[in-house]
Image (tube, grey):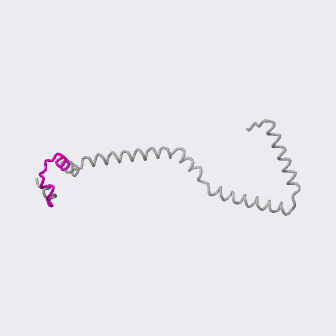
Amino acid sequence: MNIHPPEEQEFTNRIKRHLDHGADHLGNPILDRLMTARQLALAHQQTQVAGLGLAGLASVFNEILSPRARMLSALAALVIGMAGVHYWSGHPQADEGEDIDAALLSDDLPIHAYLDHGFQAWLEQP
């Protein structure tokens, strides 16, 4: 129930009377064109409404399911990322690289190891 101020209601009534007066003085060709346009618009509206039969479900998905789905997908990505980091940190190849890096940084390797072309072979020796 809309409650309008009296001035707004009076203005609305004057516009309505003016439009009714103008519509009463239109010629038949114009009235026929307006009727055809109205029927075409109604037919178009009915096809649009038929195509939007599931639009209500989309709004339910966007308002209710979508925020939960976004939260769950973010949580799943976080868990997968943490599992990947845990796996990679426990991977044996990472431990081997860590030992080599520590040896290189602490200068425990002899100088000829840096100059030798068979450096990889030397690293693989026990």
Side of 79 where 114 appears, left or right: left
Q: x, y percentage for residue 70?
A: 46, 46
In the displayed structure, 19 sits above or below 10; it is below
Side of 39 where 126 appears, left or right: left
What segment carries the magenta color?
Answer: 100-118
State yes or no: residue 34 in magenta: no
State yes or no: residue 103 in magenta: yes
In the displayed structure, 40 sits above or below 60; it is below
In the displayed structure, 124 sits above or below 72; it is below
Q: Quadrant of residue 74?
A: top left
Side of 16 where 84 appears, left or right: left
Q: Quadrant of residue 119?
A: bottom left
Q: Quadrant of the N terminus?
A: top right
Q: x, y percentage for residue 41?
A: 72, 59
**Residue 60 vs residue 82, the one in the foreground:** 82
**Residue 50 vs residue 63, the one in the foreground:** 63
What residue is shown at x 81% (from left), y 36% (from top)? 6
Residue located farthest toward the bottom when viewing the structure as drawn: 29
